[in-house]
Image (cartoon, helix red, strand yellow):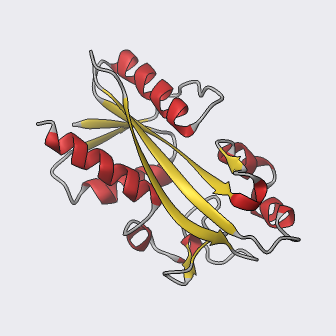
Amino acid sequence: MITFITGNKHKVEEAENIFKDYDISLKHIDLGYEEPQGTLEEVAISGAKYACHELDCPVIVEDAGLFIRALNGFPGTYSHYVQDTIGNQGILKLLKDTDDRYAEFRSVIGYCAPNSEPKTFLGKVVGEIAVEERGDLGFAFDPLFYVPSVGKTFGELTTDEKNQFSHRKNSLKKFIEWYSSQE
């Protein structure tokens, strides 16, 4: 049993849909923890260590961000704050005068078990920032994140479609493969 620490119901839904394909049970707990200023990896490690210590059981936490090349990786680790303040329209305004729309969604899973050092697992997906919001599925920056190989934004994909290749799928799959090999 792995305990997933998050207050984001969308992340829980995505993770449950991914974990159901493996023989690993997932439990969800919304346990707040301080997020240090730093990389996705540093945030994931800090949260996993804290939650593992508090609950005395194996846990995973996930931190994700949208990294836009034309904005030097912004919003990156500040994605949640940026979504809450300027939102999708603010990102579109920042990019209005650029042709460089390259972006990556990155997800880091932090895992920690009692009496062990935490581990991290990075997943990412490459795409572009659309010129307008498209789709009303998903959450946060999903309607902006266009995946050329699919021809749609994350906002136009169902959770099952998105879970075929998303950044979260990639980081969770790396974690699951490692975790399964430990038994």
Expressed as whole percent of the image width and height from the top left, the position of residue 79 reads 67, 48
Residue sitting at x 58%, y 60%: 104
User: Left or right: where does residue 123 sit relative to residue 132?
Assistant: left
Expressed as whole percent of the image width and height from the top left, the position of residue 100 reads 75, 70
Which residue is outermost to the bottom?
A: 151
Quadrant where the C terminus sits is top left
User: Left or right: where does residue 11 sit relative to residue 151?
Assistant: left
Quadrant where the N terminus sits is top left
Residue sitting at x 69%, y 42%: 78
Q: Is residue 164 above or below residue 150?
A: above
Q: Is residue 6 above or below residue 91?
A: above
Whether residue 143 appears in this view of the structure is: no
User: Left or right: where does residue 158 sit relative to residue 175?
Assistant: right
Q: Is residue 137 above or below residue 47?
A: below
Whether residue 169 appears in this view of the structure is: yes
Residue 115, picture quadrant: top left
Q: Nearer the viewer, residue 125 or 87?
A: 125
Residue sitting at x 27%, y 53%: 19
Residue 145, picture quadrant: bottom right
Expressed as whole percent of the image width and height from the top left, the position of residue 179 reads 22, 40
Residue sitting at x 74%, y 52%: 72
Which residue is outermost to the left?
A: 183
